[in-house]
Image (cartoon, coloured by chain):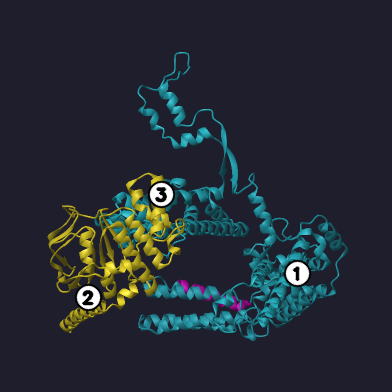
Chain colours: A yellow, B cyan
Amino acid sequence: MSDLIADHVDMTFTMPSGEQVHALKDVSFTLKEGELLSVLGPSGCGKTTLLNLIAGFLRPTGGRFELNGAEIDGPGVERGMVFQQGALFEWLTVAENVDFGLRMKKSPKAENARKVEEWLEIVGLQGFGDTPTYQLSGGMQQRVALARCLINDPDVILMDEPLGALDALTREKMQSLVLKIWKETGKTIMIITHSVEEALLLGERLFVMAPRPGRLHKEYNLPFADMGLQQDLRDVKKLDQFGEVRDEILTMIWNMEEEIMGKSA
Amino acid sequence: MSDIFQSPRGIFIAALFIALISALIWAIIYGRRLAKNEVTDLVFGNPQKALGGYHWVISGVATVLLFWLYFSWDAARAFFPNAANELCQVAKVESALIPLRSSFPFEERLLRGTTLLNRDNTQLDILRNRANSNTFDDEQRALLLPLLDRLVALQKGMASPDNFPAEIGDALGGIASRIDAVTAKLAAGELSADQRAELEAAKEGAPKWGEKSPEVPDAPVTERGALFASVAPELTEISSDFVGVRNTSPAFLAEVEALEAELKAIGKEPEVVDDFRKQLNKMLRRIDDGAVFPPGALQPVEQSLAKFHDVQLDQKGSLNLIDAFAMPGGKIVAGNTSCSEQGSGRWLPKPSDTVGTFARMADPDIGFKNIPLLSIKQKPLAEMVGFVVPDWIADLVPGAYPRHDADGTIGENLKSKVLNVATGNFPSVSVPVPTGHIWDSIMRVVTGLFFGILFGVPLGLLMGLSRLAKGFFDPLIELYRPVPPLAWAPLILTIFGIQDDGKIFLLFMVAFAIMVISARTGATGTQLSKIHASHSLGASRWQILRNVILPNSLPEILTGIRISIGVCWGTLVAAEMLAGTTGVGFVENVARKQSDYEVIWITIIILGLLGLMFDLIMRWIINKTIPWRGKG
């Protein structure tokens, strides 16, 4: 029952100039519990809008989202978010950031501290509890953001280009971490990314979206996430099958981009 | 130079002056040597080169202090304690000579007679042009022009040696020879036995320069001074006699009288003619004092004066150098009753005096206007309770206040007891409370600022988050904020009183606007992703406001507080100058009215140090509370 269902969702923005922008058109899908979904598409195809709608920061102009059998209406703790820049509270320490959600719920302090320890260990930040977040590197900040989100035990984790600002090496480590967390917690995870490789590695399912209006263009079911749990991600990337799908999707997105440029020219 | 050892203060200032000069020279030499040996970076523009350099700090401080000691004449007073007294005597001579010397081109550009002719010629030319204009008809012109011509003739006639009466020439010669006699006396440099006795008497217990008010002691205490003082009265007499000498021959006076009569006869109609007549009359009044002499008639007096001046300079001797170099930016002048410093010696107080005055003001028993600058006073706790608790609380207690009995005693009931508490009328322990001008100023700023923050920050945050609040309050704040706070002062002080209430409200207005704007900027600047994140983490609206928006706005809020303190401080001092009976601004205003430059400088220094202290506290708070600023 805890599937995430998108039911003919439409989203139209009205600009201050009065212009109507059709951001999403007739988006429907069902994400089963424990599935790992990555969403890919050229810029301006409505990826982030889709995520904000599911998070409840926006309300769709048509259709509906359902989680656990109830319509999504506003933000909620059952849908955790991880942002591109971490969106950490820089005036708090690592531990205070991580237990922010628990403190807002006013759960007992001793238990909070125990949970924080636990999660800091999972994301590999043991001993950093009292460090101010602004002293951390980008990758470490993103680990804090992950822990802060997961400690609340959400049903769905929404990630908006979570690894976009990281260097290649850190990125690879973080990709393994996401896979590990997915495996160990069995959470439903939806990742938005602009990297095709990342989408392939971190997607059991993969949606390619098309722009103007934003819509689901093509869906893939991929084996690479499962492979990545067993072997090195770099080995997975070297597989022929990986290369073929990557090239196919790259061509697809390239054509879309070209179409947009042609249109606007 | 042996005069230095007359007073310990003189010795100290002289030693300080020499030490400062040595420090300055050492710092410059040391700095030059370091610069020569510098190997780090020879490139101009590298900010690294501005690091360190405590020796330049020494040179900077030494320069400032040296300037102060030098231009306030404190150094001159230390090294030449009698110079002011001697120059005072010279100034007496100079001021006695002013009427004489100002008639000649010594300090002036032109001989006074030349100046007067010049001025009158211009005026007469203007009148002639007017007479020839078509304002007048021919008949009127025929009446006026001859009069004008006679006036010109009268004026020019004064310069002619032919009309110059011999007895006036003799009078001028007499004045010249009297000056020569005084010159000889000054040149001889001898004091009479009487004068010497007088000098010895004056030396006994005479106050030194700056020891008493008036600052410069009047009676001569040195032989040189006594010599100048001895000739001053005679010169005053000669001066006044010279002013009495006028170039008025009987013919001149007769013509003046005739012209006067004819002008009177013209009559008052029509108005233009009457107006012209008045102008002619005015010119006649100017001319009839006979201040113009034939060229050369005044030459003996001029030569005598020049001679006197040479002798005066000779007799001044080393005083000339002291006057020119040790006492820059001004001079000693002699008034009717006493001598005083003019220029920088006057408006720049001497450091040694300033320290003394400050020490005196800092004594809580003296203070300024019977109020200490800063002190601790025992105050009964009851008084503070009475101040905080409003009196009307007692009115709310049921029942009536007790009335007196037939035998005149007054009973007590609950209502009267509550009133006693509310008015602070009950026995209590005393607690030490700070008091004084400085404390009053600080409390006003802190209280105004406190209420500004208390009301300004929540409203600012609300305006940053709500369209309604922003739209509603924006016009109000934007309309009153740009008005300079001092422009509000007269109104606010009238409404709320010239004591603390009015000033605190004024400062509240200042701080409130700044706090609203900074809190609003802070709230508006919160990253949306942080708000989104806190929503997803289950925070309520209040929790988001308290835990995300407020801390995120802290840098702007603290900067706002820092700016507020600065603006409040400035506004407060101005408001205190405007009205009130305590506060640092009040002190400065009273000192200004009394031209008490020492107190003015003391208040300036106090204000600077307090402002610096406030800013250092704020910087410390900022560093402690928001180390993450700009690192999010």
Q: How far is mark 1 from mark 2, CA to CA?
A: 79 Å
* Of the two numbered discs 3 and 1 in the rendering, the one whose residue sits closer to the viewer: 3
Chain part drawn in magenta: B247-264
Q: Is residue A58 left or right of residue A130?
A: left
Q: Is residue B337 left or right of residue A59?
A: right
Q: Is residue B277 left or right of residue B594?
A: left
Q: Amino acid at mark 3?
A: Arg
Q: Quadrant of residue B221?
A: bottom right
Are the residues under marks 3 and 1 on the same chain? no
Residue B206, image x and y in percent? 79, 56
- Residue situated in front as seen by the camera: B157 or B89: B89
Magenta stretch: dominant secondary structure? helix
Q: Amino acid at mark 2?
A: Pro
- Residue situated in front as seen by the camera: B462 or B21: B462
Q: How far is mark 3 from mark 2, CA to CA?
A: 42 Å
Residue B11, image x and y in percent? 78, 62
Please say whether residue B260 is one of the residues in the magenta stretch.
yes
- Residue situated in front as seen by the camera: A186 or B534: A186
The residue beneath circle 2 is A42
